[in-house]
Amino acid sequence: MEKLRVFRLYVAFLVVCFQYCAADITFIAERFPLQGNRELSDVPWPMPTEWSRDNVTFTLSPTSLKFAPNLPECDVIHGAITRYRRLMSVNKETDPPAEVDIEGVNVIVENTTCEKYPYLDMDESYTISTGPSSISLTSQSVWGALRGLETLSQLLYEENGQVRIRNWTITDNPRFSHRGFLIDTSRHYLPLSIIKKHLDAMTWSKMNVLHWHIVDAQSFPYVSHAFPELSEKGAYSPRHVYTPEAVAEVIEYARLRGIRVVPEFDTPGHAHSWGKAKPDLLTPCWSDGKPYTAEYGQHTDRENFDPSRETTFQFLEEFMNDVASVFPDQFLHAGMDEAHYMWKEAIIWQDPLDNGVVVSNSTLIEVWKNKRNIRDCTNTSVDNFNEFALRAAKGGNRLIISSCWYLNYLCYGEDWRRFYKCDPTGFTVKREEMDQVVGGEACLWAEFVDGTNFLQRSWPRAAAVAERLWSPSHVTDADTAAFRLDAHRCRLLRRGIPAQPVLPGYCGDYDYGLEPEAPEGSGDEQTCPTGKAMQTETSSTMLLLSLIFTLAATSSA
C-alpha cells in the first residue's frame, strides 16, 4: 500500500508539471516545409503567363488600402473589392509602419460594360504593375478584374510585422476557357454551405465552371417548378433537396465570383430516381429473358428512359425547358442523350459518339474514358485517354477533357502529381485538334463523399488541375510546383477551407483549426479553436486531471 501511495503521488506530481509545461503552445516558425530550392510564398497559384519582379519592396496596410475602380456601380466589381479587402486583411500587421509606400489600387476595366453572367470564351486577361505609391490592375472585362484581384491578394506577404509587396509586373490570361469541377449531389447530398465554400476555393484557384451533376439514379434532390413530385418522391428526404431559391442562391454566389453553373441531368440512363414519381418513363434492360431489377446502392444504369413512348419525349422537353429557364448558362449537360429538343447548346459525355451517334458540331463532347485502370496507383502514365480523345475529335466538335482528373480515386502520397502531369492536348500533335480542346474538369464522384469529407478530398488536389488549365503549357515542373502548392494549401486554410496536406510541414495557427473569423463565405461558417483557445483548453484539462490524481492519492493515504 505504501508503494501504491507513493506511485500515485508521483503521478500527480508529473501531471502538475505537465500542466505547466503545456500552458503555452509556441509556434516555431513561418511555413518552411522542407529544405531545398523553392518558390517564395508570394508567387501566385496558378502560375501567371508572364511575370517579373525585383528585390524592391513596398509597404502597405490592407486595412486602409484604397481601391479606385472605374466601374464602382458594377455589382461584380463592388462585391469582389469588398471580399478581397477582407482577404488581404488576413495578413496580420503587428508592427505597422508610420507611413506606407502604397496607398491605393487602381482597378481599370477597359470594356466598361458590367457583364452580368460569365460565359464560355469570356476574356479573363489582366495586367498588374506595382509602383512606389500605387498598384495598377487593368483588364479587358470584369472577369479579368476578378482574376487579377485574386492574384494581387496572393502577392502580399508579412515581414517583421509589416505587410509588403514586391515590385511586380504581371501579364496573365488563361490557357483554356473551360476550367471546371464536377460535383455529384445525388449519391450524397451536399449542404449549401459546403457548395459555397467550394465555390470560394474554385475562384481562389481561378477555376470558372461548376459542373453540377445534380441528380442521378440514387436520388433526385432537384426541386422542379414543373414537376415537383420528382423530388418529393425521388429525394432522400424532404430536407435533402435543392429548392428553386437554393439553386438561385448557388448561381448568384457563383456569378459574383466569375463561375458558370452548368447543370447536368443525365439521360437516358442513370434514371432510377426519376421513376420513383414517373414509373412509366422508364424501361429496364433485359437479360436471359428477364428484366433487370435495380439494386439499391448500386449502379442502376440498366434502367433507361423508354424511347418507344412519345410521352417520354414530351415530358423531357417540358422538363428541360423548365430547367433552361432556371440556369442562365448557354450550355446544359445532357449526359449521354442527343438532346435534340433543347434550345440550349448541349454538353454530352463521349459515349454517343462511341456508339455511332451523330451529334451537332455545336455540342461539346466531354472525354471521360481512360484505357488504363485509373484506380491503379502504380501506373502513373497520363496518356491513356489519347485513343478516346482522338475518336471524339474526328467530328470537329470542341472537347472537354476529364479522363485523367477523377479526384474520387485516391493514391497514397502526392497523387496530385498525376493530375499535374496530364496535359489535355497531349493526345495529339495536330494544331487543329489541340484547338478543339476548350478545357477540362476535375471530377469528384460522390459514392464515398459527402459534406464530411468533400472539401478535404477536393483541395488542394483540384488546384493541380487548375494550374494545368490556366498556366502556359511549359509550366510542368512538379518539384517546384510542390512548394507553391503547399503555400496555396496554407492560404486555403487561412481562408477557411480545410485543405489536406501536400508536404510534411506546418501552417502556423491554422494547423489546429480554422480561424473563428473566416474572411469570406456565406455567413454560416463553422468555427474551430485556434492555438490560444486550445492552450486554454489544454491547461484547464491538465489542471483538472492533476486535482483528481492528487485527491485520489490523498484519500488513499
Image (cartoon, helix red, strand yellow):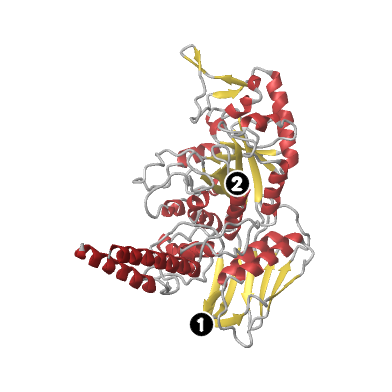
Q: Quadrant of residue 116?
A: bottom right
Q: Secondary structure at mark 1?
A: loop
Q: Which residue type carries mark 1? A: Asn
Residue for point 71% across, 61% down? 142
Q: Position of residue 178 (x, y in %)?
A: 60, 50
What residue is pinned by disc 1?
Answer: 160
Residue for point 69% across, 45% down? 246
What residue is pinned by disc 2?
Answer: 191
Q: Nearer the viewer, residue 358 or 56?
A: 56
Q: Position of residue 327 (x, y in %)?
A: 71, 43
Residue for point 65% across, 56% down? 522
Q: Position of residue 439 (x, y in %)?
A: 57, 49
Q: Position of residue 211 (x, y in %)?
A: 60, 44
Left or right: 133, with 489 as reference point: right
Left or right: 395, with 540 as reference point: right
Q: Quadrant of the C terminus?
A: bottom left
Please say whether residue 489 is visible from this viewpoint.
Answer: yes
Label 1 Cα neighbours within 10 Å, binned few <14 / some 14-19 / many ≥20: few
Q: Is residue 291 above or below residue 47?
A: above
Numbered badge on residue 300: none
Q: Considering only order in the chain, which callout, 1 or 2, is on the residue closer to the N terminus?
A: 1
Q: Secondary structure at mark 2?
A: loop
* Labels 2, 1: front one: 2
Q: Which residue type carries mark 2? A: Pro
Q: Nearer the viewer, residue 160 or 357?
A: 160
Q: CA distance from mark 2 to mark 1?
A: 41 Å
Q: Quadrant of residue 21?
A: bottom left
Please say whether residue 342 is visible from this viewpoint.
Answer: no
